[in-house]
Image (cartoon, rainbow, N blue to C red):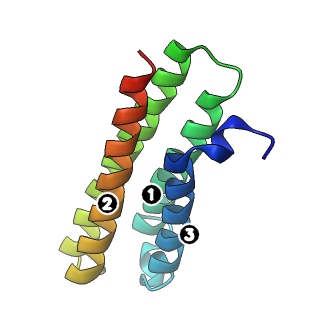
């Protein structure tokens, strides 16, 4: 693998999450296409994109900053999951699954960030 981020397990997990969320949002009603679908997909994509962007050619301080962005995007994903469940678009089962996946990624980001110090 040519880039540092490709070897990061947290990036790999975030990339898996983007695919899983993409599949989930295909079940959303069309009226949510430019609302919750778009927001949830962008937030999920932002997790792995920020990990990748911060990892290459950056100082540890700069990488930590991008990991912070990725972490905040993870929190946004969790909030979107709540909105989707509230609107009865996301089942309790899907909510629990994606909440747990996102939470685990956020914990991994926190650990990586802490390890940079």
> Where residue 95 appears, x then y in whole percent?
26, 73
| Circle 3 Cα neighbour tier, 10 Å, few/some/many (<14 / 14–19 / ≥20) | few
Q: Quadrant of residue 78?
A: bottom left
Asked whether the viewer can see residue 17, the reply is yes
Say which residue label 1 marks: 39
Q: Residue at x 36, y 34 (%)?
A: 111
Q: Secondary structure at mark 1?
A: helix
Q: Which mark is residue 80?
A: 2
Between disc 3 and disc 2, the foreground one is 3
Q: Secondary structure at mark 3?
A: helix
Q: Secondary structure at mark 2?
A: helix
> Where residue 71 appears, x then y in whole percent?
38, 39
Seen in the picture, residue 25 relative to 62 is either above or below; the reply is below
| Foreground residue among 6 and 17 | 6
Considering every residue shown, the one lying at the far right of the view is: 2
Q: Residue at x 46, y 23 (%)?
A: 64
| Circle 2 Cα neighbour tier, 10 Å, few/some/many (<14 / 14–19 / ≥20) | many
Disc 2 and disc 1 in contact, CB within 8 angstroms: yes
Say which residue label 3 marks: 19
Q: Quadrant of residue 52?
A: top right
Horizontal side of 103 relative to 1 (left or right) equals: left
| Circle 1 Cα neighbour tier, 10 Å, few/some/many (<14 / 14–19 / ≥20) | some
> Where residue 74 appears, x then y in whole percent?
37, 48
Horizontal side of 9 relative to 100 (left or right) equals: right
Q: Which mark is residue 7?
A: none
Seen in the picture, residue 36 relative to 111 is either above or below; the reply is below
């Amino acid at each position: 693998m040519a880039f540092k981020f490709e070897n990061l397990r947290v990036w790999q997990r975030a990339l898996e999450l983007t695919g899983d969320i993409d599949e989930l949002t295909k079940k959303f009603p069309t009226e949510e296409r430019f609302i919750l679908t778009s927001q949830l997909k962008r937030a999920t994509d932002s997790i792995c994109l920020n990990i990748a962007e911060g990892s290459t050619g950056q100082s540890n301080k700069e990488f930590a900053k991008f990991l912070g962005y990725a972490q905040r995007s993870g929190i946004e994903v969790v909030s979107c999951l709540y909105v989707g469940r509230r609107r009865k678009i996301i089942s309790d089962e899907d909510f629990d699954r994606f909440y747990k996946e996102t939470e685990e990624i956020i914990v991994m980001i926190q650990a990586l960030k802490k390890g940079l110090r």
